[in-house]
């Protein structure tokens, strides 16, 4: 018997492809091109992070799934997460360009979590959202290839985050899919956490910080993946909590899309982020997780779905203004 929620679908999702032929061959449309087109079409730079935390779920969701109705705590939590996240997606889809699924929260649920992860990928695509897997993988050889197969091929996400600490060969399986299959890669460059400076700001031979050298590599890795928009399918993660470094890295990595975490709960605000965008007011998308999905905690007079929609609409307008006025 086929499990509920699964479908007979190809691993490569159709909206990664267009009716664009060269020599009779259907070509994959690059992730960078699709991302920038979505930004312009929706007039939005918003990415909604899906970081489900059982302790923060709305009471109505938890009460709908009493523990005694399930064989285990894991089954019950998975059911709560499913109702919560599937209920959120339609509320944010019109105002966000992508969702970013933080895989750690789903891995805690074992097989049920992976099933929910795959179902969210499909649901996001059905609503016209790009899907980014926040997995921060970094390994070599067959292991790196296996990570790429698991997330980009089989789960079917549009892009994933990777850790470049092991060097160029550790990111090759992901780059191959960016170059030939229309997939995207976001490489950790300057992360939003306070202690990132302990390693990322270390001075390297020849001068400058380590994150600057990684940024140069990211620009090189993206060569050959740029679409008509001028942006590559290999991007960089640059924390919004570092506005000065963000401005510097925007100038250094022209044509590289930036994924900017740190908005909202971590302290970054729209007015700080003008330097992350290019002179046309594009080239970056900004993630907010807790600030959106748990927005009901800041709006006790609103239902959790309405509060999430309001927060996305507000964030969208603030970022659009900051992007076009330089912050």
Image (cartoon, rainbow, N blue to C red):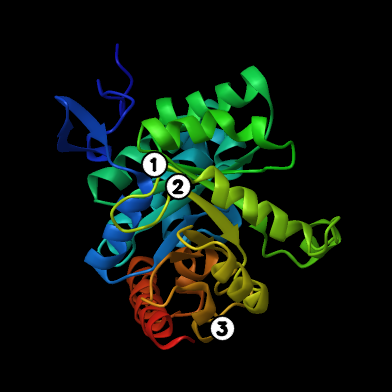
Residue 272: give its label: 3
| Number of residues whose C-alpha sits closer than 10 Å to that of mark 1, classed few (under 14), some (14–19) or many (20 or more) | many
Relative to residue 185, is residue 253 depicted above or below? Answer: below
What is the x, y in percent for residue 74? 57, 35
Determine the CA span between mark 2 and mark 3: 24 Å
Q: Quadrant of the N terminus?
A: top left
What is the x, y in percent for residue 268? 59, 77
Location of residue 211 (image quadrant): bottom right
Q: In this view, does 153 lie to the left or right of 229?
A: right
Residue 289 seen:
yes
**Which residue: 69% across, 30% down?**
139
Comes first in the chain, label 1 or label 2: 2
Comes first in the chain, label 2 or label 3: 2
**Residue at the disc numbered 2:** 132
Residue 86 seen:
no
Q: Which residue lies furthest to the front in this view?
A: 206
Q: Contact, CB < 8 Å: mark 1 with mark 2?
A: yes
């Amino acid at each position: 018997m086929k499990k509920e929620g699964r479908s007979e679908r190809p691993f490569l999702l159709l909206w990664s492809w267009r009716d664009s032929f060269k020599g009779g061959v259907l070509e994959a449309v690059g992730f960078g091109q699709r991302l920038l087109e979505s930004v312009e079409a929706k007039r939005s730079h918003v990415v909604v992070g899906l970081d489900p935390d059982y302790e923060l779920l709305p009471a109505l969701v938890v009460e709908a799934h009493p523990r005694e109705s399930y064989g285990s705590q894991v089954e019950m939590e998975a059911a709560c997460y499913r109702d919560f996240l599937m209920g959120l997606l339609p509320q944010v889809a019109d105002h966000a360009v992508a969702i970013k699924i933080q895989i750690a929260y789903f891995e805690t649920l074992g097989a049920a979590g992976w099933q929910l992860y795959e179902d969210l990928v499909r649901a996001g695509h059905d609503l016209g959202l790009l899907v980014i897997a926040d997995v921060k993988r970094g390994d070599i050889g067959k292991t790196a290839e296996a990570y790429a197969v698991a997330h980009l091929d089989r789960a079917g996400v549009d892009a994933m985050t990777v850790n470049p600490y092991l060097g160029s060969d550790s990111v090759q399986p992901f780059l191959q899919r960016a170059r030939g299959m229309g997939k995207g890669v976001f490489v950790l460059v300057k992360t939003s956490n306070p202690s990132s400076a302990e390693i990322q700001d270390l001075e390297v031979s020849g001068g400058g910080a380590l994150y600057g050298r990684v940024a140069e590599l990211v620009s090189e890795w993206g060569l050959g993946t740029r679409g008509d928009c001028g942006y590559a399918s290999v991007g960089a993660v640059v924390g919004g909590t570092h506005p000065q470094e963000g401005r510097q890295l925007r100038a250094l990595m022209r044509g590289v899309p930036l994924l900017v975490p740190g908005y909202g709960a971590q302290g970054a605000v729209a007015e700080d982020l003008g330097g992350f965008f290019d002179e046309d007011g594009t080239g970056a998308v900004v993630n907010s997780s807790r600030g959106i999905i748990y927005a009901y905690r800041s709006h006790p007079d609103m239902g959790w779905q309405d509060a999430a929609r309001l927060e996305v609409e507000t964030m969208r307008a603030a970022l659009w203004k900051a992007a076009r006025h330089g912050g």
